[in-house]
């Protein structure tokens, strides 16, 4: 039995709650993972996991052992990193998941500069607005707008997205230009709805002007669950939409979008970078996080309370 492989297999089973999921993230067969954990238990002469047909639970002894194993694996990784001089040149594959507009408009255009600094990092970038099972899908980190509701994750506050309401000139020519946010729910006006994966529903538009505060739900003719599709619908004149400034900026310059309700204020949307709490933050992940923070400081700097 390779003790390193056995400890790594055990830790991943604890993190994923499943031998099958652990095997997938380690690129091993379920049988191999099961045998490694069994051999580890035999060597330690203690049961680390309770197994049923539906789930795997860690025992009290297993939980205590897991905490030590995580620290040991992190120390081993640090030792290898220092000996291979990877701390000077981070290397290896990094799997991340980011919102589709952020990838298209900010991250991917800036990647040449990232690779100029870190040519030995290979990124696998999931581009979506869906909920991602970070541990189950073996994702190193995700970038998401809105508060992080999963309290089991570590999160770093990397940006505050300034929000406003916009519409295409073609829409305003057809429906007229509203002067008050309440008009989003009246007359011939419509909005484009965005379906948030965390809640499965569209969020209302919360706005403030002086002491006046409102929440307008809008009347969506079309509701989508992807940021790029949402923007495309607004550009096509299908309705008013609220956007982060970085998404609207290039289309304001060309006149494809026009701002509405400019005397009203919308609370900025925080953006977080989240990663598993017990997973060692490797050199490659650390430099990626720092790069995202640096990039967002240019386009959407944090103006509120940080986290993580």
Image (tube, helix red, strand yellow):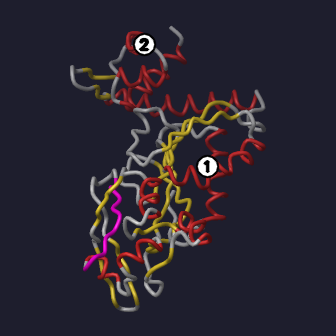
Q: Relative to 49, is 303 on the left or the right? A: right
Compare residues 258 and 209 and report the one nearer the observer.
258
Which residue corresponds to the image point at 40% horizontal and 68% vertical from the top-left?
A: 241
Q: Is residue 86 above or below residue 155?
A: above
- Residue 208 falls in which quadrant of the image? bottom left
Q: Residues within 10 Å of mark 2 (few under 14, many from 20)?
A: few
Q: Position of residue 68 (x, y in %)?
A: 49, 31
Residue at 31% of width from left, 70% of height from top? 190
Residue 270, compared with residue 156, is above or below; it is: below
Q: Callout 1 environment at 10 Å: few (<14), some (14 to 19), or many (20+)?
A: some
Region in magenta? 187-196
Q: CA distance from mark 1 to mark 2?
A: 32 Å
The question of residue 250 being in magenta is answered with no
Please give the label number shown on residue 289. Answer: 1
> Which label is found at residue 29?
2
x, y (%) of residue 187?
A: 25, 79
């Amino acid at each position: 039995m390779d003790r390193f492989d056995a400890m790594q297999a055990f830790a991943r089973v604890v993190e994923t709650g499943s031998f099958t999921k652990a095997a997938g993230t380690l690129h091993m067969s379920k049988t191999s993972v099961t045998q490694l954990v069994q051999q580890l238990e035999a060597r330690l002469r203690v049961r680390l996991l309770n197994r049923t047909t539906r789930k795997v639970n860690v025992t009290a002894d297993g939980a205590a052992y897991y905490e030590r194993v995580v620290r040991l694996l992190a120390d081993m990784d640090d030792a290898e990193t220092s000996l291979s001089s990877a701390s000077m040149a981070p290397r290896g594959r990094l799997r991340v998941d980011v919102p589709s507009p952020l990838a298209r408009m900010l991250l991917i255009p800036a990647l040449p500069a990232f690779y100029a600094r870190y040519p030995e990092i290979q990124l696998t970038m999931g581009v979506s607005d869906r909920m991602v099972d970070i541990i189950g899908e073996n994702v190193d980190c995700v970038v998401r707008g809105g508060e992080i509701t999963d309290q089991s994750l570590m999160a770093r506050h990397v940006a505050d997205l300034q929000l406003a309401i916009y519409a295409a000139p073609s829409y305003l020519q057809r429906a007229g230009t509203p002067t008050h946010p309440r008009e989003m729910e009246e007359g011939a006006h419509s909005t484009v709805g965005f379906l948030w994966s965390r809640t499965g529903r569209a969020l209302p538009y919360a706005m403030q002007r002086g002491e006046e505060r409102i929440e307008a739900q809008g009347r969506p003719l079309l509701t989508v669950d992807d940021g790029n599709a949402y923007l495309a619908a607004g550009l096509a004149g299908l309705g008013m939409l609220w956007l982060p400034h970085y998404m609207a900026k290039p289309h304001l310059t060309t006149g494809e979008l026009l701002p509405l309700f400019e005397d009203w204020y919308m609370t900025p949307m925080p953006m977080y970078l989240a990663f598993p709490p017990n997973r060692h933050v490797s050199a490659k992940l650390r430099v990626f996080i720092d790069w995202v923070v640096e990039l967002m400081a240019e386009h959407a700097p944090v103006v509120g309370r940080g986290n993580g």
